[in-house]
Image (cartoon, rainbow, N blue to C red):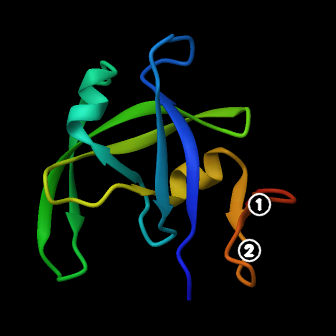
Amino acid sequence: MGETYVKVRIRALPTSPEYEELSLLVDTGAVYSWISRNLLENLRAKPVRKGRFKTIKGEIISRDVGHIFIEYEGEVAPTTVVFAEEGDESVFGLHALESLGLEVDPTTRQVRRSEALIAL
């Protein structure tokens, strides 16, 4: 099965003139998006807490977690982000997908707008 990527812009604040354009691998198994700490700090994003995460190998790791604004095809939404360290993959997680009202089509593996989000 192929991989799905999205081209997005990220900002620390919704009105900030500073942004980065990224192509991120969509990972619906990752709750949050993981983006390079250096890139996030260059945008002046700040961590707000520590999070504990279980890796694919079963290890528990600790990473800083914060909030950013992510833009995809003109839509902007807030999302939670993990400050990825050297050796961590950068991915577009489920929280960002849902915040933007997006889903991955299981047949085509393309990102598309959701008809509606689940209310309950």
Who is closer to the viewer here, 67 or 106? 106
Q: Are marks 1 and 2 in contact (CB under 8 Å)?
A: yes
Q: Using the rendered image of the protein, determine whether residue 41 is visible from the camera's viewpoint.
A: yes
The residue under label 2 is which amino acid type?
Asp
Q: Using the rendered image of the protein, determine whether residue 118 is visible from the camera's viewpoint.
A: no
- How would you rate the neighbour count of disc 1 (Cα within 10 Å): few for under 14, some for 14-19, many for 20 or more? few
Q: Which label was assigned to residue 105?
A: 2
Residue at (74, 74) in percent of width and height: 105
Left or right of 88? Residue 43 is right
- Residue 42 is situated, as x and y percent measured from the top left of the image, at 27, 22
Above or below for 107 versus 69: below
Residue at (37, 43) in percent of width and height: 81
- Residue 63 is situated, as x and y percent measured from the top left of the image, at 17, 49
- Residue 97 is situated, as x and y percent measured from the top left of the image, at 60, 54
Which secondary structure lies at badge 2?
loop
Residue at (47, 43) in percent of width and height: 22
Left or right of 102? Residue 20 is left
Who is closer to the viewer here, 49 or 106? 106
Q: Which label was assigned to residue 112?
A: 1
Q: Residue furthest right?
A: 115
Which tag, 1 or 2, sits closer to the chain's start? 2
Cα–Cα gap, marks 1 and 2: 7 Å
Report the quarter where the C terminus lies: bottom right
- Residue 86 is situated, as x and y percent measured from the top left of the image, at 13, 52
Above or below for 102 versus 80: below
